[in-house]
Amino acid sequence: MNLAELNKVAEAMVAPGRGILAADESSGTIKKRFDVIGVESTEDSRRDYREMMFRSTEAMSKHISGVILYDETIWQKAKDGTPLVELINKAGAIPGIKVDEGAKPLPGCPGEVVTVGLDKLADRLPKYYAQGARFAKWRGVIDIGDGIPSYACIHANAHALARYAALCQEAQIVPIVEPEVLMDGDHDIDRCMMITEWVLKETFQELFYNRVAFEGMVLKPNMAIAGNKAKNRAGIDEVAEKTVKMLKNCVPAAVPGIAFLSGGQSDEEATAHLDAMNRIGNLPWKLTFSYGRALQAAPQKAWSGKPENVAAAQRAFSHRAKMNGLAALGQWKADLEKKAA
Ligand code: 13P
């Protein structure tokens, strides 16, 4: 393993004013997104949609540092035969690959899941590297509810994340370590914060035991945020302050950067939260975005599967990418949204 090279990639993934486009929806998830806009999910429609984003030169060359791909996409070619990976590289972004195989029920822990996919991972990683992937993603899922999460669930997911991360670094691929505490439910921000701290502490302990080099990874956490059904949702400043406090308590300064998931926040909420955190300043790591929904909801709607909408969809994508790029610098303003509308 060449740690200096891994660190260079990790730093580039969180470069100032840039963040990651999470375009790695599984076939099941992208079908759900396409159902909303009335588009049939086929190999070609998924290709057309993602090609539209990767050809958004404005967004890709200025605000997007890397793209997380799903297995199908990393092998796909654009309509004109250019590999999609080449489009991403040409725009100056780094191709990455989701390598986990989804979450499965965790025996003995009703209502809880563990992410699988370690068995053949050591064989799969060199193939992804040869295809151009320089980073990978693995997502563990922790749900908050009555009597959950259990320590068994937190430990199993943290251990799998650490095993995955060690295998990635061995294959010269930067691991995005994503332990996601879900926003589903009516819990308040303090419960989210307490559970997320527990999850992050366990995750970094497992990373240490598995000899993962912190300089060569990127953390992708949830923010400290109230559940989506909570009666009192915390405001923007409270989310920012509590998230930064939580991260300072758990994430070693050796980690180059933290790229948040959006997790069901609205587009503008996800941007405002990131911006408010960066305005606090004086942080040991870069704070940026690795958004799926919060970057893609607007372009998906604008595109709606019609070739004549490609330019409008690219404008919508570029706008969100630019807003989040500014938020990664703490330079976003709410009225920039209104001007665009
Ligand atoms: P969301 O931003 O839609 O939560 O997706 C990010 C992601 O990659 C989840 O694994």
Image (cartoon, grey):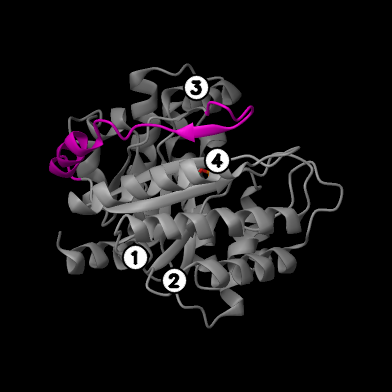
Q: Position of residue 35 (x, y in %)?
A: 56, 21
Depicted 48 relative to depicted 68: above or below: above
Tell me if label 2 and label 3 are in contact, CB under 8 Å: no
Specify start and end residues of the magenta stretch as a single range: 106-132
- How many residues crowd mark 1 within 10 Å: few (<14), some (14–19), many (20+)? many
Q: Position of residue 229 (x, y in %)?
A: 79, 41
Measured Cα–Cα span from mark 2 to mark 3: 38 Å
Tell me if label 1 and label 2 are in contact, CB under 8 Å: yes
Query: Seen in the image, is 99 located left or right of residue 316?
Result: left
**Mark with earlier residue (1, 2):** 1
Q: Label 1 is placed on what type of residue?
A: Phe
**Mark with earlier residue (4, 1):** 4
- How many residues crowd mark 4 within 10 Å: few (<14), some (14–19), many (20+)? some
- How many residues crowd mark 2 within 10 Å: few (<14), some (14–19), many (20+)? some
Q: Position of residue 42 (x, y in %)?
A: 39, 17
Mark 4 falls on what kind of element? helix
Q: Label 2 is placed on what type of residue?
A: Pro
Disc 4 versus disc 2: nearer the observer: 4
Q: Could you tell me which residue is drawn at 61 percent across and 55 percent down?
A: 196
Measured Cα–Cα span from mark 4 to mark 3: 32 Å
Q: Label 3 is placed on what type of residue?
A: Lys
Tell me if label 4 and label 2 are in contact, CB under 8 Å: no
**Mark with earlier residue (1, 3):** 3
Q: Could you tell me which residue is drawn at 18 percent across and 49 percent down?
A: 171
Can residue 107 be found in the magenta stretch?
yes
Mark 1 falls on what kind of element? helix
Measured Cα–Cα span from mark 4 to mark 2: 24 Å
